[in-house]
Amino acid sequence: MTLTVKLEPALEALIAARCRAEGSTKSAIVHAALRAYLERNPKSAFELGEEVFGKRGSGRSDLSGRRHDYYAELAHAKRRSRR
């Protein structure tokens, strides 16, 4: 796959200097940097399943992300009904 990325001139110069020092290519340097970044910052289980959490039975697709809001609404409604 080919990917085009816009770089600041200073960053491009750093990459070029590293390529000369290591005898490597820009692609190899960027590939290694992206792989290292992605391995350090994997998605959490919540991020992987976020679109399906909370949908079953409730009909609300955002239930897992806004559960605190919904609980607060339920508690508020319960207090109002007691009055």
Image (cartoon, rainbow, N blue to C red):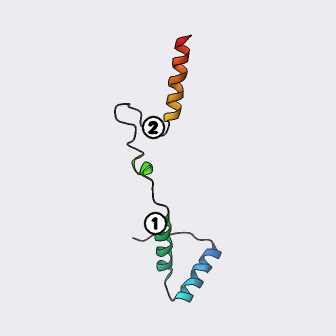
Q: Where is residue 40 in the image (x, y as percent from the top left)?
A: 49, 65
On screen, residue 20 above or below 38: below
Q: Where is residue 13 in the image (x, y as percent from the top left)?
A: 62, 80
Which residue in the rendered view is the most extreme toward the right? 10
Identify the secondary structure beneath mark 1. Answer: helix
Identify the secondary structure beneath mark 2. Answer: loop
Q: In which quarter of the image is residue 8?
A: bottom right
Q: Which residue is drawn at 52% across and 23% down?
A: 75
Q: Which residue is drawn at 57% across and 79% down?
A: 15
- Crowding near the residue tagged with mark 2, few <14, some 14–19, many ≥20 C-alpha atoms within 10 Å: some
On screen, residue 8 above or below 63: below
- Crowding near the residue tagged with mark 1, few <14, some 14–19, many ≥20 C-alpha atoms within 10 Å: few
The front one of 34 and 83 is 83
Q: Position of residue 53 (x, y in %)?
A: 39, 41
Q: Quadrant of the C terminus?
A: top right
On screen, residue 25 above or below 44: below
Q: What residue type is labelled 1?
A: Glu
The front one of 29 and 63 is 63
In the picture of the structure, the residue carrying the numbered disc 2 is: 62
